[in-house]
Image (cartoon, helix red, strand yellow):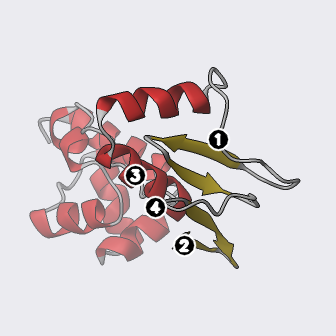
Amino acid sequence: MTNESFFCRLKEERKRLGLTQASAATHVGVARETWSRYETGVLAPGMEVLSALAMNGADANYLLTGRRSAPIAQPLPPDEQLWLDCYRGWDMPVKRNELARALGLAPTQAQVLPGAALAGGGDGHTVSMGNLANTAPGSVQVGFVGDKVAAKKAK
């Protein structure tokens, strides 16, 4: 075949995914011998094979062009997503206050009890994580019930 670098990238991508030739072949629906011919440049995989490989985590852009695609963002754990959602809803002074608090540059508004993970606040309200003693009006208590994040607004 004419583009030897494609075949080297195909092998490199298979190894990056932690696949053997046999498992890569199974993922894309070909025989192991056929996969071996892809990597040696004897055969070129068709679009169906490349598509199946991409659906199993391969970087198709890298295979075809030699340039990596932008990394795909992994979903955040629920507690981090909750914090980010709150942060995005705050105005800039509250964001600055919370960042200072998170970096330990400002005092927290809640009394933290043993076992607490995080306490912070903004504009007279408090967002609390962990075991906190703050039930002031406008407070939000956040914690875990099993492995799920639970939030409760104080009345």
Residue type pointed to by label 2: Lys
The first of marks 3 and 1 along the sequence is 3
Asked whether disc 2 touches disc 3, contact meaning CB atoms under 8 Å apart, the reply is no
The first of marks 2 and 1 along the sequence is 1
The reply, left or right, for residue 110 in relation to residue 20 is right
Between marks 2 and 3, how big is the CA–CA gap?
14 Å
Q: Which residue is mark 2?
A: 152
At label 2, counting other C-alpha atoms closer than 10 Å, the crowd grade (few under 14, some 14-19, many 20 or more) is few
Residue type pointed to by label 1: Gln
Q: Quadrant of residue 33?
A: bottom left
The reply, left or right, for residue 123 in relation to residue 71 is right
- The residue furthest right is 114
Between marks 3 and 4, how big is the CA–CA gap?
46 Å
Residue type pointed to by label 3: Cys
The first of marks 2 and 3 along the sequence is 3
* Tag 2 secondary structure: strand
Query: Residue 130 location in percent, x, y?
Result: 71, 59
Query: Residue 28 location in percent, x, y?
Result: 30, 72
Between marks 1 and 4, how big is the CA–CA gap?
58 Å
Which quadrant, please, contains the N terminus? top left
Between marks 4 and 2, how big is the CA–CA gap?
51 Å
- Look at the picture and state if 34 lies above or below 76: below
* Tag 3 secondary structure: helix
Q: Which residue is mark 3?
A: 86
* Tag 4 secondary structure: helix
Between marks 2 and 1, how big is the CA–CA gap?
17 Å
Closer mark to the observer between disc 3 and disc 4: 3
Residue type pointed to by label 4: Gln
Q: Which residue is mark 1?
A: 109
Q: Quadrant of residue 36?
A: bottom left
Q: Quadrant of residue 149?
A: bottom right
The first of marks 4 and 2 along the sequence is 4
